[in-house]
Amino acid sequence: MNVIDAQGLVKRYRTGGQVLEALGGIDFTLDSGEFVSIMGPSGSGKTTLLNILGLLSTPTEGKVLLDGNDVTNLGDRKRTTLRKRKIGFVFQHFYLLPTLNAVENVEVPQLFDRNPGTRRRAIDLLERMGLGDRLDHRPDELSGGQKQRVAIARSLINDPRIVLADEPTGNLDRKTGRQILDEFRRIADDEDVAIVAVTHDELVNQYVDRTVHLVDGTIGREEIDA
């Protein structure tokens, strides 16, 4: 089943009297448990597409279906609720809160829910990421790979249907990058979570089911990866 079905996405920005077209009519689908990479040069529309898929931005034209429901024109409050329930985000620069330890950083998306099981789930996620001995460590006491694994755990705290990752290996060495990609692959296969990774890193394509190449805001080609 399609978790995401994006149809005819166009995104235009008005800057100084000129109109910039960031996306020029993109169709994109994503299935449960599918791991897809989106590649392309800077300015090709990768981040714009990711933001629309993550309900952080709305298209100028076209529509986005999430689990079969049209979410294109929802108000801010409903979009925020859907993001919280169904979408996890992993950013290149981690965005961990420096004063919180690893467990507390993972708990952040659930801070206002008063769910008594949140602490246990946060610990379980970190242990799955191989960070059982780093639970009380703050970000400045963690390596780049460890920070990224905390960020992945945080993205999973709400049991999302989709994880969207922006340059997930961009700040990591090759060995650590492979560990992170192994974890993404496991999450897709074992937990049926759909994953989209925007990247410049060809290493990512060794792990994904499909690679989408963007060129000037349109899909140049798609590759099915073995």
Image (cartoon, grey):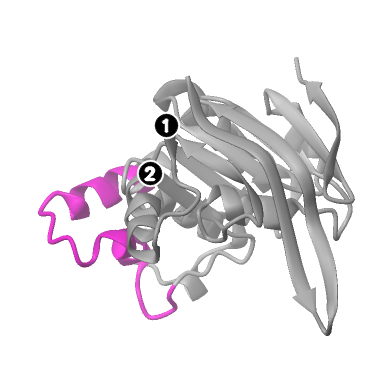
- Determine the residue positioned at 33% across, 57% down: 78
Residue at image mark 1: 67
Q: Amino acid at mark 2?
A: Lys
> How crowded is the residue under tag 1: few (<14 C-alpha within 10 Å), some, or many (20+)?
some
- The overriding secondary structure of the stretch rendered in magenta is helix
- Determine the residue positioned at 79% across, 58% down: 22
The image quadrant that residue 219 belongs to is top right
Marks 1 & 2, CB-CB < 8 Å contact: yes
Q: Secondary structure at mark 2?
A: helix
Identify which residue, 214 or 129, lies in the foreground: 214
Alpha carbons under labels 1 and 2: distance apart: 10 Å
Whether residue 129 is visible = yes
Q: Secondary structure at mark 1?
A: loop
Identify which residue, 45 or 97, lies in the foreground: 45
- Determine the residue positioned at 40% across, 26% down: 191
Answer left or right for 150 relative to 118: right
Find the residue positioned furthest to the top: 226
Magenta stretch contains residue 164? no
Residue at image mark 2: 86
- Determine the residue positioned at 51% across, 75% down: 140
Answer left or right for 192 relative to 148: left
> How crowded is the residue under tag 2: few (<14 C-alpha within 10 Å), some, or many (20+)?
some
Measuring from the top left, give residue 35's x and y in whole percent. 61, 30
Magenta highlight range: 97-126
Whether residue 168 is visible = no
Answer left or right for 183 relative to 102: right
